[in-house]
Amino acid sequence: MLDYTNIAVLDLTHAGIIIAKKFAGLGFKVTAVDVYRTVDENILSGLESDHGIITSKDPMPVDGFDLIVSPAHLDPEYAMLADARDKNIEIMTHHRAVGMILSMTGSLDGATVVEITGSKAKTSSASLLADMLSRKMKVILHTSRGLELWDQGSSRIVRLGLSIAPGSMLLAVDRLNELGIAADCYIFEVSIGLTGFADVGVITTLEPDYTIAASTSNASDSKMDVLSHCQPEEIFFLNVRDRKALDKAEENSRTFFTFSDSEELDADVQIHFKDGDIVLDYKDGVFSSSLRLNYNSRSYTTAFAASGSVAMWMGVSVEDISNAISSFEGLQGRMQEKDLSGRKLIDNSNSGMDIRSAERSLDYALSKPKADSGRIIMVLGEEAAQVCEGLPPRNVSQFVTKRGMDIGQLILVGERMRGIAEKNVAYAPGLEEGLSMALEASSKDDIILSCVKCFR
């Protein structure tokens, strides 16, 4: 760490600003590059005047830098990255930089830190774990839902609006310090990887995988990268389905435990459903927990397995884990069943929603009892194309072609969806407008299915 003196931080859009500020505060000479040219000039001027950070919207010569900090998803052919590789200048991800900053500042010393990443079930795993752990300790939870304080199975929102980009971990810690809030355990949901700073790292699942960095690498590789650089004592919890993560953990001599959402796949903790209950099977025994009926519990299998395995390892009693599961009612926008002005609403609108999730939601809606005259009114699309890479219109068009016959009325949300020309389709600018249109188009026997990619 002491070998670095002159650092360039690339990408100020995805929480790179806070990384640049922290490095400057630690005494490094810092240059911040607005790769996507999205940051207001006044903000850049403030970085220079208030923090002594050189800023640029254009690539800069890399000579003189001894470290380039770049997000995992940036195109590796971006000029500064290509030049740095040619000149053997070290390149570090935002994830690793955040871990380094947390280690240097000591801001979370004395607490247990858990980081959770994965393609699916990050938020639900983190939220269930916070509930379980809060039965024996005070817990701070940072997810795409916001910053929450958990105590004795209850939570309150501390702050909304933070992203799950790795740099937002630093913002979350700052906000908590400003509010004078501390906890025994901090749980962070992190996008596309882990920092390597935590005591416990969880990878919920590597599937479905997708490409990043201008299609030059897979997101799964970024999520597993922590296994090659974390602190030696970090403990990992891995999905037994993710063979390549298990192999990498073994290759790097990491301590890890496995969880499984299937009776057919052996793991340290396995779960399955039986007679309306969920059963957890672990090395010291078996226990079951009842489930609420107002959400699709089977869509949370990975979350139950991941959170239950970590909670048991951290010493939470079987009784407390069972109570947390039995009181769980699903998360907003994650397969919750609700009443909407006398209509049944299946709410699956959230930041991680993709076309596979939409199709599973449709299958679930079709499985629900309804009158012969009942239809599925589906609200589908995106409120912001930048939310986790948006919902590609091409995928939506293919879905409509494949499953249109199962949908009584389709309402597409978002400007990009207007190019999809199908019969019996209406268009709405946002989620709330789409739900209003669905109410108007529905009868009391219909089911409204909400599948919109959005921040909630």
Image (cartoon, helix red, strand yellow):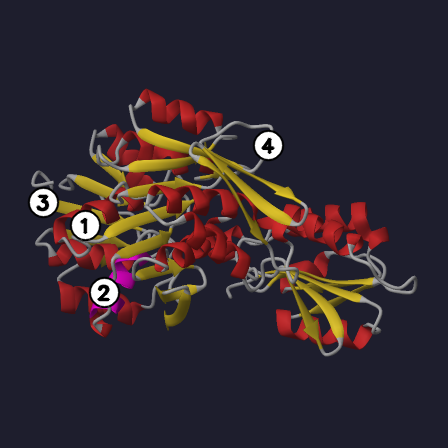
Q: Which residue is mark 3?
A: 5
Label 4 vs label 1, nearer the camera:
4
Residue type beneath disc 3: Thr
Mark in front: 1 vs 3: 1
Residue indicated by mark 2: 182
Looking at the image, residue 244 lies above or below residue 169: above
- Residue at mark 1 to residue at mark 3: CA–CA distance: 14 Å
Q: Which mark is residue 101?
A: 1
The image shows residue 180 at horizontal and vertical percentages of: 21, 72
Magenta stretch?
Answer: 168-177
Which tag, 2 or 3, sits closer to the chain's start?
A: 3
Side of 345 where 220 appears, left or right: left
Secondary structure character of the magenta stretch overall: helix
Question: As shown in the figure, which amino acid type bears the numbered disc 4?
Answer: Glu
Q: Say which element carries label 3.
A: loop
- Residue 453 percent location from the top left of the image: 58, 59
Which secondary structure lies at badge 1?
A: helix
Q: Provide residue 207's location: percent of width, then percent of height.
A: 54, 37
The residues tagged by marks 2 and 1 sit, at their Cα atoms, a distance apart of 19 Å
Q: Which residue is mark 4?
A: 263
Within 10 Å of disc 4 (Cα), the crowding (few <14, some 14-19, many 20+) is few
